[in-house]
Image: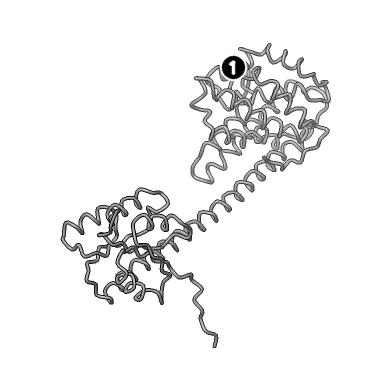
Amino acid sequence: MSQYIDLTPRQMILIVDDTPDNIALLSGLFKSQYKIKIATNGAKALQIAAQKPAPDLILLDVMMPGMDGYETCRRLKSDLLTVDIPVIFLTAKNQPADEEKGLLLGAVDYISKPISPAVVVARIATQLNLIRAQHLLRDQNKYLESLVRDRTSKLAKMQDAIILAMASLGEVRDNESSNHVRRTQLYVKVLARQLSLHPRFKHELSAENIELLYKSAPLHDIGKVGIPDHLLLKQGKLKAEEFEIMKQHTVFGRETILSVERYLGESNNFLRFAREITYSHHEKWDGTGYPESLKNDEIPVSARLMAVADVYDALISERDYESALEHQEAINVMREGRGNHFDPDVLDAFIEVEDQFFEIARNYNDAMLTPMLSVN
């Protein structure tokens, strides 16, 4: 039968007393069970207490030359390095006012001399067992917090992968490149950060909401999974009646997000942004867009940002029926849409960061074939 070996490190007691006999008595009581350190004055006690490893408990005499025990305790409790070390006064000053003063200074107990060894040992053991339990609880909490952070991080990565995988369902059936999703996602983040400085948008575009917009942007064309292949893959421009069918991808996208919300029984900002973007990113500032011909501030902010990102990327990308424009040519076309296609303030913010759009377009060009599930 194997013998249990306790590997728990012995706790440390710092005994602070200027009388050798008291030190000898207390050391004899505790040395077999605990590690012992000795200080014969307050200054030395402060020095030892601030070292690593710190004592688990301090037994502190009151009447000492120079710095007395009360002042020593006050300094221990005013220092971040030593504030959490429990202090027990062990002193001949046994008046109620003395005990009250010691406890008010932060001591956990006050034991009067002459001592009863059995009582002192029991009271010290109680405090050290409590300390050990607190440390175990603290370590357990740290472990649980670490576990939660790790699992939350893994869950977030999995969610990002699922979002981009869902987004790719629409893109792989379309003539869009896989990098269109990645580029527009990055455009939206850059544009949102710039607009967050504007009084009209700073409330909506908090740092948290910008991150949610970034995550939801890839879903803007998810509704294309509901469009027939012969229209989605058609080379050349769509006829009027075909375009009416194509417009339905905004409705299909919104219904997809709504089905998720119904399943969950609730919504949140991520799903709200995803629903707004999928449904309204083809609306125009002057009311000539679709699917509802919304005007001006009727169009959700998220959709206004997506409109700029989507149109810019369309202009610089090769299409079966249209050649890609150079960056500056695309900028000129975008300028013409200020106040009719685009919210003027959003378009102005885009112009402020056009160099970042160009950098994104260059770094994630279609020839690079960036993997769809690459998420930063």
At x 64%, y 43%, the residue is 160
- x, y (%) of residue 61? 28, 62
- Residue 48, quarter of picture: bottom left
Label 1: which residue? 343
- x, y (%) of residue 131? 38, 63
Foreground: 125 or 146?
A: 125
Q: Is residue 54 above or below residue 120?
A: above
- x, y (%) of residue 369? 80, 37
- Residue 118, quarter of picture: bottom left
- Quadrant in which the C terminus is drawn: top right
Foreground: 239 or 275?
A: 275
Amino acid tagged 1: Asp
At x 81%, y 21%, the residue is 324
Foreground: 25 or 8?
A: 25
Disc 1 residue crowd, few under 14, some 14–19, many 20+, Cα 10 Å = many
Image side of residue 115 versus residue 255, left or right = left
- Quadrant in which the N terminus is drawn: bottom right
